Amino acid sequence: MKTLIKARWVIAFQDGRHGVIDHGQLVYEGERIVYVGPRYEGQADRVIEAPDSVLAPGFIDTHVHSGHRALHKLLADGGRPSLFGQPYMDVTIARKGTQIRGYPNYLDKEQAARDPGIALHAAFTVAELLRNGVTTFVELGGHVLVQEALWAQCEARGIRGYLGPGYDSGRWQSDEDGRLERIPYPDKGQQLFEDALAFIRRAQAHDSDLVHGILVPREIENCSLELLRQTVRAADELNLPMATHAGYNVIEFMETVRDHGMTPIELLNHVGMLRPTLNIGHANLISNHPRMNYSGGDDLGLMGRRRVSISHCPINIVRRARTLDNWKAYRQAGVNITLGSDTYPRDMFMNMRTASYHGKVMSHDLTAASAAEVFEAATLAGARSLGRDDLGRLAPDTRADMCLVRIGRGDVLRYGPVWDPIRSMVECGIGDDVDTVICNGRISMRDGIIPGVDLPALRRQVQEFAEDIWPSLQDWDPLKRSAQDMCPISRCTHE
């Protein structure tokens, strides 16, 4: 069946870049786009009229952790200074002898199997991504059971997931006084790696473009050299993309230098991982960053020469008082900058805007991190990191992944007059402006409604879930803090 979409603006891919067609049209048939241009002369079986909307490529979120992020909500405006602004260490590392609740991604198999939240986490994650116009996402390192739940949601709701069961050679743990220590696994992570490979092979054998595997050694400091080398061999053998967290934390940087005499980026290069289809989570705390005070290193040049991809998560890290040191320098070095939501909100418009504004400030250049560049990061660059040239763009014979963004709706003045729809979306847009999402030729959301998903009910479920786990925080928190201790309810004072 051929579907014709008529939109006020169409963001079309032409001559290697995005461009704008005023009063454009697009036709897709099955899973593929067959026409993009000013006027389609053939017949269509279905017509979608969108006179107040932009037809844009579906967004690609390259850094997702499944969950409703209830624990991360306790870190707003606070956290332990000794962790240097690293959120996951503050809320997902339990005190020795205890077990975290409400975040199953890093539990062992037996613990994760008993966690009641896995299905709810997956349902919330996928619904939020679709509601914000995302058609492809990468999950970095949740437990195999987390990936299984996401797989079911991908097929039920119509979204493309690159699912990466996480593995490592050991984990961080906290002693009774809140001090971090690294605890190795007896088998150095071999079983976790085998479990991940088994999952990925099943995904490869599955005849659907909605589910793919990706190799995810979770954090560079917790992986042995052999485990990283096994990752490279598997990536070559199975033609897989890879993702990890590196250059994401002061502690991780220092631990890697202490253990190996190399920076995390140098270590990745040492084992052969640096390549365009490696997605490095964050990579903002590297040897070139002035705050690291690391003499003689050139991680940025090394990443650029290898054309690696980084998943820049601007909203998450700016809440932790840091940002990408210099957007312009990363681009000029040749680094492929993609965008990820990481924690919350999974709103690519807000992430594009945050990346643009902070990119300008940190580059000391008002032309840096332009709307075109951050829009590319949310679309084309994400596809590049996955080795895909049929995603992140609207062009004939590419996947029919797209979203309609209502920037001309009559009940909103936020956009004002529109000169350039890409700039308007980046500067004024929010995820709730997305009206329709089409993934792989399937309408996954229409008029803001995701078939089979009751958004208000889902919202109530996660609120109830969060209110059940917040009172028990002191049971596993390294410092035995209550939720109120960690995140006091806001009070405004006037003196």
Image (cartoon, rainbow, N blue to C red):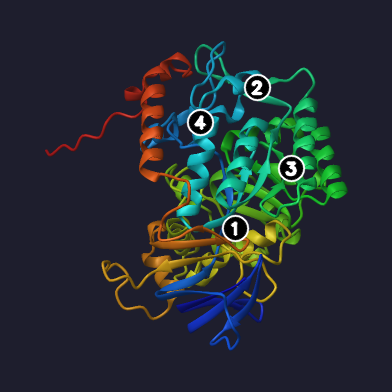
Identify the element where label 1 is drawn: strand
**Residue toward you, 215 or 131:** 131
Amino acid under disc 3: Leu
464 to 157, vertically: above or below? above
> Mark 4 or 2, which is nearer the eye?
2
Amino acid under disc 4: Leu
Q: CA distance from mark 4 to mark 3?
A: 27 Å
| N-term mark: 4 or 2 | 4
* Tags 2 and 1 touching, CB below 8 Å: no
417 displayed left or right of 27: left
* Tags 4 and 2 touching, CB below 8 Å: no
Residue named by callout 4: 83
* Tags 2 and 3 touching, CB below 8 Å: no
- Residue 89: percent from the left, percent from the top? 53, 30
Residue named by callout 3: 215
| N-term mark: 3 or 1 | 3
Q: Which residue is depicted at the point 53% across and 80% down?
A: 25
- Residue 155: percent from the left, percent from the top? 62, 47
Q: Name the image quarter holding the C terminus.
A: top left
Amino acid under disc 2: Asp
- Per the rendering, the mark at residue 294 is none
